[in-house]
Amino acid sequence: MEREEDKIGVVPPPSLSTEKAALIEKLTPGTQWRSRELLLNRQIEACRLREAGKKGYNHQGTALLIQAASAVPDLEAKLGIVGYRHNYQDAGSRVTLLVVLSDGRLAVLKVGPRSGEAEQLKLLAERGASVPEILNNGVIGRGGKMVAWLLMRFIEGHVLGAKRPFLVVEPGLDYADVRRRVAEAGNFFRLAHQPLPAPYDGPHDFPGAISFREEVGQYFDSVCVPKAAEAGLMGPGDPTVNSRRWLCDFDTAALAAPPALLHGDPAEVNVMERPDGKLVFIDPVTSYGPPEFDAARWISRLFRHGGHSPYVVADLAGVAVNVEPKLDLHVLLLALACELRADAWHESVKQGREYALQLVRVADELVRLSPEVAALTPQPDYVEKGLALVEARLLQLETEQKLRVRGVTLSEAISSS
Ligand SMILES: Nc1ncnc2c1ncn2[C@@H]1O[C@H](COP(=O)(O)OP(=O)(O)OP(=O)(O)O)[C@@H](O)[C@H]1O
Ligand SMILES: [Mg+2]
């Protein structure tokens, strides 16, 4: 809720022409001019509240955020920041500000612990993958108080997660559009996953580089498992106990191919859509790992908000594999199983035990199918045959167990496309 002091307006910077100030206001609907202090204090306060509620797995404490915030005045002078627009409130351990530069350009400034984000964005951009353009980046501070900063060009548009109907797949509702976005993401992954050039044959080279194993392991342990426990899904023989082993199945299967440069978290909250419909992938995290990881996270997240059937996995996996031939179908099934289980636990408190268990059943089936799909590999049309197998088996599961997640089945979802 907006508070009284939030409503206190700040006027546009006097150095900006009236036209430029008006253009900025048009490009950033729903935001106002704000003072640096107010925005930083809001972010710190939000972080403190989150810390108290222990929500947010990558939360590293308010101390880091305060450290990052203390570098902002120096950066303001260094980068020629003349004004701030109302912010992104939900900062984790990094400060994120929408800023106006002295030449009237809009930019996003991120300040925080060294994460390798700038390095990763540069590598992705070099490959032609659609990411925000870096205007400048560096580190600032001294000794243990060093923080990294990143100034990116502002992207006009909205974050996909902010526009729910975009993700919803219900019979008759724009499934074709979801397929188009899966294909576009597949194209992003295809570009990102190209072999790393020297000297980056070890992507571990760049600061903050983290493998998908660390990232996913941390996500399982600190977010998904506690939520599953809260929803009463933990107990003897419960799948959550084996979370690391599932990751291990996927990981072992993926080891045959060299690790690729990843986005690492292409979830709906990290993808922006421009007014012309083009997608831009922001906020990369994991730097290297199996290419199937990116595709699986993207596809599985399409289910989280949508109120639609998870049984479209076969269909969407097919779209992704057709666009990005480096994706190995049997590894992708294991990756999807991993992500669907993580999502099942993540959503178990909100959506209930039954929803979670249905997702887990689908994930289990994908794991069971994976060796059968792998066995098809000598055949030239292995992808087609493999997908047909997956689809048939999930439909069978649906019939046998009367699986319907939020009322929609695979047959209905596919027939609506
Ligand atoms: N280049 C950009 N142009 C426009 N808006 C942006 C840009 N980069 C980020 N944003 C906005 O800022 C929000 C937060 O950005 P981002 O996802 O990079 O960080 P985060 O997830 O909050 O933090 P962290 O990097 O610590 O995970 C996004 O949801 C988006 O609304
Ligand atoms: Mg993000």
Image: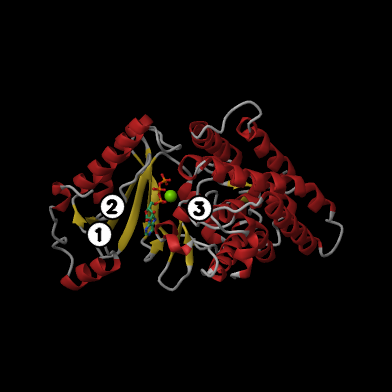
Nearer mark to the viewer, of 3 and 2: 3
SS assignment at label 1: loop
Q: Is the residue marked by circle 2 packed among few (<14), some (14-19), or many (20+) residues within 10 Å?
A: many
* View extreme (top): residue: 236
Color scheme of the displayed model: secondary structure
Q: Is the residue marked by circle 1 packed among few (<14), some (14-19), or many (20+) residues within 10 Å?
A: some
Residue visible at 61% across and 52% down? 296
* View extreme (right): residue: 378
Label 3, ligand 2: CB separation under 8 Å: yes
Q: Please, what is the three-letter code of the amino acid marked with disc 3? A: Ala
Q: Please, what is the three-letter code of the amino acid marked with disc 2? A: Asn
Left or right: 328 in relation to 15: right
Residue beneath disc 1: 31
Could you tell which of marks 3 and 1 lies nearer the N-terminus? Answer: 1
Residue 249, image x and y in percent? 71, 39
Q: Quadrant of the C terminus?
A: bottom right
Q: Nearer the viewer, residue 223 or 194?
A: 223
411 w.r.t. 304: above or below? below
Residue beneath disc 3: 267
Residue beneath disc 2: 87
Left or right: 197 in relation to 346: right
- Work out how far the residue at label 3 is from the one at label 2, CA to CA, in angstroms: 21 Å
Left or right: 291 in relation to 120: right
Q: Is the residue marked by circle 3 packed among few (<14), some (14-19), or many (20+) residues within 10 Å?
A: many
Label 2, ligand 1: CB separation under 8 Å: no
Tell me, yes or no, whether the two marked residues, 1 and 2, touch with CB atoms within 8 Å: yes
